[in-house]
Amino acid sequence: MKIYYVSVLILLFAIITGCNASKKEAILCAGATTVLPVVSNAAEQFKLTHQDVNIMVNAGGSGVGINLLGEQNIQIGMISRNITQKEIEKYPDVHFVTHPIGKDAVVPVISSEIYDAGIMALTIEQIAKIYKGEIKNWKEVGGPDKEILAVDKEMSRGTRHVFMKIVLGNEEAAAPGADLVLGSNNEEQTAIAQSDAAIGMLSNAWINGDVKGLSIILANGEVVEPTLENIINGKFPITRNLLLITNGEPQGEIKEFIDFIKSPGGQKIVEQAGYVSLYQ
Amino acid sequence: MSAYISKVGKGYIIISTLISMIIILLILGVLFLSSYDAIHGGGWRLFTLTWNPPNNQFGILPMLYGSLVVTVISLVIAVPLGIFTAIFTSEILHPKYRIYVKSFLELLAGIPSIIYGLIGVAFFSVWVGELFHLQSGRTIFTAAVLLSIMILPTIITLCDDAIHHVPQKYREVAKGLGLYKHEVIITSVLPIAKTDIIGAVLLALGRALGETMAVMLVIGSIDKIPTPIYNLLAPGQTITSKLGREIAESAFSSIHFSAMVFMGMILLIIVLALTFIAQQFLKSGQRLYE
């Protein structure tokens, strides 16, 4: 009887370890929802030519990507902002190496109803006042008499870092005027489309008919539209690099995958997703 | 041989019990150890109003308020509805149809919470916004109503069992005394089923306190207690929605992470305390028919 139990145990053990041995090599990626469409499309194409490689792409936001890489749970982090000094200090064992794969702009966006009512451009200062809670009604900036629904994002999101650094001067500034705090680009886009008086922040590629991108009035009075052209020539004030990060210089299949995204074929995916490629 | 099997069976049962107990103790221990940094570094400052990790401010009161308010409101909505429906299915509805109605309700209880969340975000929160002329329908009230819908099937089906299990003789005696049907239900059936009904409510309360996904999507996720404090048509945050949104952002073993775990521990303590109180309460009210 005892032998029977022991042999069952051994069998179980063998099954568990056997499963591990037969597992396909997987590259795990996670992070910014801004970078996600590029990497997941690139992974699809990469797998066509490298059938023995399995690539898993997850969302979570830039902060999550950095933390997961810092804890060495993933091989590639996707981020849409720079790594902060604090984050580098948090993981002394990890040597973060960044790989730019494209460029993007963070655009202040508003509900189409407000856009159609005539608000097509604001100054950085006006946007800052909205997020500080000093401007609460659209009529204070020349729009209709409607209360502003200021949509904020989770603190560690890349889009928020880039946006708040320009608008409030500090990437982790609190926004006391915010009415909602949301996460991914999809969530933010949905909330602004559902409302008729919302303002938020989105990556340039996520603007559509219901969610309109605002032009920004510069200090000298010039109005800059959020067009690809203005992002390429650097006129639009809130731009950022889309980055992949690895722990140390990438090796083997991970390097091949990153090189593929940087290649002309991979950069086409970046352009198709609505971002600015490395060649533009 | 059969004595041997009996021994093995006994050993298996004891080991299973031990494993369950160890898991509970481990969870409590891990939660306490992981939140020690926050308790040690923050102390009473954990019970303040501002949550701002970059400034090392970890006030959990807004989340605590959100969790309690959302749960209480959802119970206030769902408990009376649930008990009345259970009275209908077990006392008034023809027994032939009871099983169909009941299996349908149990189907509802099995719907994954993310489905409720999606319906909440896509339709329900928009309706709430339009109904009350709000800027945004993502409010504490929305989350509470959504939760009450989610826990309703649990309450109905358990209360229905409780009422159904009251032996027929009590009804017959009450009827024999000349009571009307509603008097029979109020004076004899419900008091006898009381213990099990309270158990049903407790189970629903546990689910409401712990629900994450659906609440997270519709509550607005603002770490503020609304002004004035009873304004339920304002966005808020619960402990679970906060954990769901932020736990992956906080680095393991940072104070931020520790404070998040502390919130989880508070939630567990609330649930444990409620269970304990309810058990004490139930002891005095033993089932009459046993």
Image (cartoon, rainbow, N blue to C red):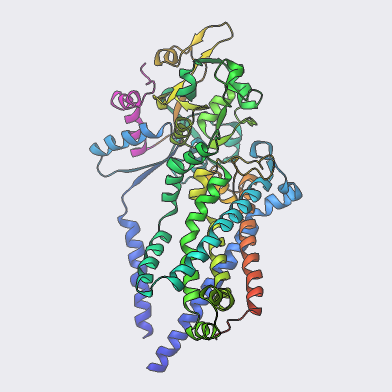
Residue A125: horizontal and vertical position, in percent? Answer: 61, 17
**Placement of A187 over or under A139, stated as above or below:** below
Q: Residue at x 37, y 63 (%)?
A: B104
**Placement of A22 over or under B53, stated as above or below:** below
Residue A97: horizontal and vertical position, in percent? Answer: 47, 32
Q: Residue at x 51, y 31 (%)?
A: A158
Q: Nearer the viewer, residue B141 or A176?
A: B141
> Is residue A175 found inside the magenta-colored segment of the image?
no
Horizontal arrangement in the rendering, residue B180 relative to residue A45 (left or right): right
Segment tinted magenta in the rendering: A251-280
Write down the quadrant of residue A273 in the picture.
top left
Residue B71: horizontal and vertical position, in percent? Answer: 59, 55
List the single residue furthest toward the front: B178
Question: In the rendered image, which quarter contains the N terminus of chain B?
Answer: bottom left
Residue A51: horizontal and vertical position, in percent? Answer: 24, 42
Q: Residue at x 47, y 71 (%)?
A: B160
> Is residue A274 found inside the magenta-colored segment of the image?
yes
Q: Nearer the viewer, residue A132 or B199?
A: B199
